[in-house]
Image: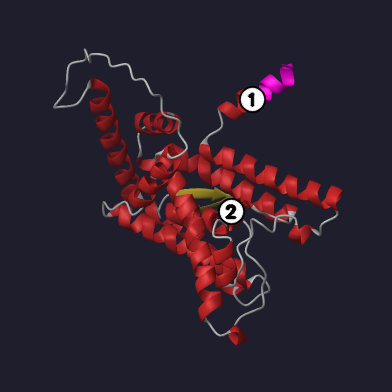
């Protein structure tokens, strides 16, 4: 194994979940480009099996597209913008929230964008709509994460060049821009953006009330991935020598305490902003996001 190959494999091992999604998106884009170059298929058709069609009956033929469209980009600028925003927003997400929960918000945003797109283009009279093609791009998932953060901690401040603005200002700007875009040529994309934004807002406001609306989706995905896990026919049973703490072993007890501490810190952020945290609390959140 060459040194370069080894370095690449090591870097891939240490990527967080969203960085891996970014790698997959870039890989899919270049596969489409190679198909265009070597098979001479038009660029707008190289990833046709991933696109989400606007016609409901076409969608029934390829139901997987309700997720796979989020990995397909035809334009380099479209890909670059989505992946750059996803990279920066994901750094905050994985430091503040469990990776599985962050991933749930992202994919539920992809699903919500797809469902709203299908709903609008199959119910609203076509005379009121701009004629658009199939849906592609990760924007609905990216919007879900952005609006989630803006709604969960609206008064946290962010630096935009030399200007300091609150997150709710960013969220409002995103919604206004997408609304204006509904009257442009990318109407279908903006509809999907709204689907992601609505999901992100609902997820954040419910989570602040103590309701995690993504738990059902998490269980479904866990069950789906378990179908592909190989089970060993033999199982070695060892006596648990660790003393229980309130009916749980030490690791479970520590995990419970850490989660409660994270919840208290996130509640403090939602009420007073990120800057109200002590150095110890910031360090604890950073370490929790890395685990």
Q: Quadrant of the N terminus?
A: top right
Q: Give SS at disc 2.
A: helix
Q: Who is closer to the viewer here, 144 or 30?
A: 30
Label 1 belongs to which residue?
Answer: 9
Task: Locate residue 102: give its quadrant.
Answer: top left
Is residue 16 shown in magenta? no
Q: CA distance from mark 1 to mark 2?
A: 25 Å
Q: Who is closer to the viewer here, 288 or 242?
A: 242
Q: From where the camera sits, is residue 240 visible? A: yes
Task: Locate residue 269: give its quadrant.
Answer: top left
Q: Give SS at disc 1.
A: helix
Instruction: Report the magenta stretch's main SS.
Output: helix
Q: Decide if residue 164 is on the left or right side of residue 37.
A: left
Residue 54 image position (x, y, % from top left): 60, 70
Task: Indicate whether 137 appears above or below 7.
Answer: below
Which mark lies nearer to you, 1 or 2?
Answer: 2
Q: Decide if residue 61 is on the left or right side of residue 278.
A: right
Q: Considering only order in the chain, which callout, 2 or 1, is on the residue closer to the N terminus?
A: 1
Is residue 2 shown in magenta? yes
Q: Decide if residue 45 is on the left or right side of residue 263.
A: right
Residue 18 image position (x, y, % from top left): 54, 41
Label 2 belongs to which residue?
Answer: 68
Residue at the spot 71% in from the left edge and 48% down from the top edge: 29
Instruction: Report the magenta residues as a range.
Output: 1-8
Residue at the spot 67% in from the left edge and 70% down from the top edge: 133
Q: Quadrant of the C terminus?
A: top left
């Amino acid at each position: 194994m060459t040194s370069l190959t080894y370095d690449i494999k090591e870097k891939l091992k240490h990527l967080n979940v969203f960085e891996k999604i970014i790698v997959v998106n870039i890989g899919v884009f270049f596969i489409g480009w190679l198909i265009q170059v070597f098979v001479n298929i038009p660029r707008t058709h190289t990833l046709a099996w991933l696109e989400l069609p606007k016609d409901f009956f076409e969608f029934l033929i390829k139901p997987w597209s309700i997720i796979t469209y989020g990995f397909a980009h035809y334009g380099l600028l479209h890909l670059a913008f989505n992946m750059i925003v996803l990279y920066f927003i994901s750094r905050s997400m994985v430091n503040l929230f469990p990776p599985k929960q962050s991933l749930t918000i992202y994919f539920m945003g992809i699903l919500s964008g797809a469902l709203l797109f299908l709903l609008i283009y199959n119910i609203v009279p076509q005379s009121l709509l701009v004629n658009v093609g199939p849906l592609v791009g990760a924007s609905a998932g990216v919007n879900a994460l952005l609006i989630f953060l803006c709604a969960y901690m609206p008064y946290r401040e962010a630096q935009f060049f030399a200007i300091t603005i609150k997150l709710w200002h960013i969220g409002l700007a995103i919604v206004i821009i997408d609304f204006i875009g509904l009257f442009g040529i990318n109407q279908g994309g903006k509809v999907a953006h709204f689907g992601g934004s609505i999901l992100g807002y609902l997820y954040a406001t419910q989570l602040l009330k103590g309701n995690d609306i993504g738990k059902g989706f998490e269980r479904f995905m866990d069950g789906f991935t378990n179908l592909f896990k190989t089970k060993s026919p033999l199982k070695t049973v060892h006596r648990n020598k660790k003393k229980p703490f309130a009916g749980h072993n030490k690791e479970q007890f520590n995990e419970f305490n850490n989660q409660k501490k994270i919840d208290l810190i996130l509640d403090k952020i939602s009420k007073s902003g990120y800057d109200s945290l002590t150095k110890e609390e910031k360090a604890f959140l950073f370490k929790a996001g890395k685990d």
